[in-house]
Image: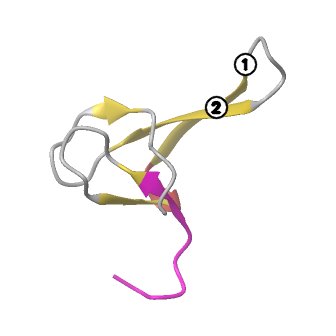
Amino acid sequence: MNSDEAILGRCPDCGERIPETWLLVEYEKNDGTDGVWAECPACEDVVAPEESG
């Protein structure tokens, strides 16, 4: 993976880093914060990426 590629976060299922290119949907939650759904390139599940820390 290119080190300059933006990361959305990590897959909550397998822990794999999810690049921004795997983004499926961006939306605004009821509380006004932004949410995203992305496909995990490793386990191929659609997930809400967790913040990488």
Magenta-drawn segment:
1-9
- What residue would you read off at disc 1? 29
Label 2 SS: strand
Q: Give left or right: position of 44 versus 49.
A: left
29 lies above or below 1:
above
Q: Give left or right: position of 21 versus 46.
A: right
Q: Quadrant of residue 32?
A: top right
From the viewer's side, name the closer residue of 36 and 53.
Answer: 53
- What residue would you read off at disc 2? 35
The x and y percentages for residue 42 are: 17, 54
| Residue at (51% x, 51% y) in the render | 51
30 lies above or below 2:
above
Q: Residues within 10 Å of mark 1 (few under 14, many from 20)?
A: few
Q: Give left or right: position of 32 versus 35.
A: right
| Residue at (77% x, 11% y) in the render | 30
Determine contact: label 2, label 1, CB under 8 Å. Answer: yes
8 lies above or below 50:
below
| Residue at (44% x, 40% y) in the render | 38
Magenta residues, dominant SS class: loop
Hey, what amino acid is under mark 2? Answer: Gly
From the viewer's side, name the closer residue of 47 and 50.
Answer: 50
Q: Is residue 32 magenta?
A: no
Q: Quadrant of residue 33?
A: top right
Hey, what amino acid is under mark 1? Answer: Lys
User: In the current view of this chain or complex, which residue is farthest to the bottom?
Assistant: 3
